[in-house]
Image: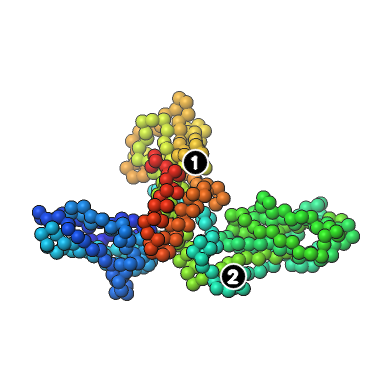
């Protein structure tokens, strides 16, 4: 007898079960074994996708644990048991594995905009797993941001000498300034700016200002590490009193391995697992939350914690006509820090009356999560590294590591959802 398990993502860990109640009769399970075959290759995948440390059984049910898989592959998972009277039985299940994009839909519930950054960078994950490209030179990329040469006086004292943006997301980056000779009394001020998009807008990165260069300290190089969370950085400089010679470069440590694409999925999957275990959104993301009816109480609690904003509350009547409530008039928003936020009725107000549309009648679009990777508690970051480690080594780190992960995440779990 073969069943079809629901499709899973290649980095998603979850429980499965085999129910023998209908064929055991008066017997109970005396022993069991679970194995897996990759149907794409015909090879034994038991040690790859199954975690024997999490397998158990009741009288008539066997519980297994899937921990990995390859996108586009299907796995035949077979559970064989011996009954208490010596009878042999087996059940099969087909498990399809497919990478599902981390995006949702604009309505009907789901993720509208996933996080653009992760709590751990690719470089941090590689350091934790002790991986790199194997050569020092192969890890480094030097990109010119502002070409070297004589730069004229900045009009109005503004930062008019702007470098080109460089992608540094998930990488270690160092900004270098190469100074030649300043003109008599000339000064140069340079700072690092950051942005989410190559075209900007760019804003000053806190802590990104270099020491002012004068004739007393010219003809030398200066450097500063970028530790922000944006995808692009550039330099912005201003020259006062006299023309000065200088240029800027950005050095990126981008250790590349053959597993980089898999590691990118791994760190995203580790963050998702931490979110599932804590029932909270870890970094900024936008969701549509579906409510099936107006509550009897004067508020609706929003899942995930760290509520940043509620961008809309919409409802549909029996004809499917959608109405958008007015913030501040029809409802108020409580962000409530790291706890669950709420949409609350103002004093003297009530929820809309009348029958609701039968499908997804009330949609609340909200944004939640810590704003930057630096805001994420260290316990959660460490747990995500451990989750990624355990998945990378196919669970070989065992129960001790899982207990450590549970301990790190326990105090951050939201118990309302």
Is 245 left or right of 364, judged from the image as shown? right
Residue displayed at 65% across by 66% down: 251
Q: Residue 191: where, in percent of width, then height?
A: 72, 55
Disc 2: CA contacts within 10 A as few (<14), some (14-19) or many (>=20)? some
Residue displayed at 78% across by 53% down: 158
Q: Is residue 73 in view?
A: yes
Residue displayed at 51% across by 54% down: 119
* Residue closest to the eye, 227 or 405: 405
Q: Which residue is mark 1?
A: 338
- Which image quadrant is residue 289 in? top left
Q: Which residue is mark 2?
A: 139
Q: Residue 316: where, in percent of width, then height?
A: 39, 41
Q: Is residue 363 in view?
A: no
Q: Secondary structure at mark 1?
A: loop
Mark 1 vs 2, N-terminal side: 2
Q: Residue 394: where, in percent of width, then height?
A: 38, 64
Q: Secondary structure at mark 2?
A: helix
* Residue closest to the eye, 148 or 142: 142
State the count of labels: 2
Q: CA distance from mark 1 to mark 2?
A: 38 Å
Is 73 left or right of 142, judged from the image as shown? left
Query: Mark 1, mark 2: which one is toward the viewer?
Result: 2
Determine the residue located farthest toward the front in the rendered image: 400
Quadrant (top left, top right, bottom left, bottom right) of the C terminus = top left
Disc 1: CA contacts within 10 A as few (<14), some (14-19) or many (>=20)? some
Determine the residue located farthest toward the top in the rendered image: 348
Tags 1 and 2 touching, CB below 8 Å: no
Q: Residue 385: where, in percent of width, then height?
A: 48, 57
- The numbered disc on residue 107 is none
Quadrant (top left, top right, bottom left, bottom right) of the N terminus = bottom left
What colour scheme was applied to this rendering of the protein?
rainbow
Residue displayed at 45% across by 49% down: 408
């Amino acid at each position: 007898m073969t069943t079809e398990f629901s499709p899973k993502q290649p980095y998603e860990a979850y429980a499965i079960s085999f129910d023998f109640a209908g064929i055991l009769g008066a017997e109970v399970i005396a022993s069991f074994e679970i194995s897996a075959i990759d149907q794409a290759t015909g090879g034994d995948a038991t040690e790859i996708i199954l975690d024997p440390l999490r397998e158990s059984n009741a009288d008539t049910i066997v519980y297994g644990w899937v921990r990995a898989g390859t996108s586009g592959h299907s796995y035949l998972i077979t559970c064989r048991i011996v009954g208490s009277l010596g009878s042999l039985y087996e059940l099969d299940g087909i498990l399809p594995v497919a990478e599902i994009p981390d995006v949702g839909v604009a309505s009907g519930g789901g993720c509208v905009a996933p996080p653009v950054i992760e709590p751990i960078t690719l470089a941090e994950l590689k350091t934790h797993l002790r991986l790199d490209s194997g050569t020092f030179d192969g890890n480094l990329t030097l990109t010119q941001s502002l070409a070297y040469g004589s730069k004229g006086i900045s009009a109005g004292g503004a930062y008019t000498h702007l470098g080109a943006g460089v992608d540094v997301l998930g990488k270690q980056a160092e900004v270098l300034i190469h100074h030649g000779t300043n003109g008599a009394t000339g000064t140069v001020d340079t700072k690092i700016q950051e942005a989410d998009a190559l075209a900007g807008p760019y804003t000053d990165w806190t802590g990104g200002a270099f020491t002012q260069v004068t004739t007393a300290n010219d003809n030398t190089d200066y450097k500063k590490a970028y530790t922000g969370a944006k995808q692009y950085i550039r330099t912005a400089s201003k020259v006062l009193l006299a023309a000065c010679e200088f240029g800027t470069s950005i050095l990126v440590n981008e250790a590349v391995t053959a597993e980089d694409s898999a590691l990118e999925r791994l760190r995203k999957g580790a963050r998702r697992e931490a979110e599932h275990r804590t029932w909270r959104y870890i970094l900024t993301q936008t969701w549509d939350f579906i409510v099936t009816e107006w509550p009897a109480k004067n508020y609706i609690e929003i899942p995930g914690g760290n509520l940043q904003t509620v961008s809309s509350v919409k409802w549909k009547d029996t004809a499917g006509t959608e109405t958008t409530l007015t913030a501040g008039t029809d409802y108020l928003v409580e962000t409530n820090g790291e706890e669950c936020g709420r949409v609350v009725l103002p004093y003297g107000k009530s929820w809309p009356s009348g029958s609701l549309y039968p499908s997804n009648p009330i949609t609340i679009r909200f944004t939640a999560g810590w704003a930057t990777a630096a805001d994420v508690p260290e316990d959660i970051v460490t747990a995500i590294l451990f989750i990624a480690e355990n998945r990378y080594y196919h669970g070989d780190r065992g129960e001790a590591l899982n207990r450590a992960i549970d301990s790190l995440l326990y105090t951050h779990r939201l118990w309302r959802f």
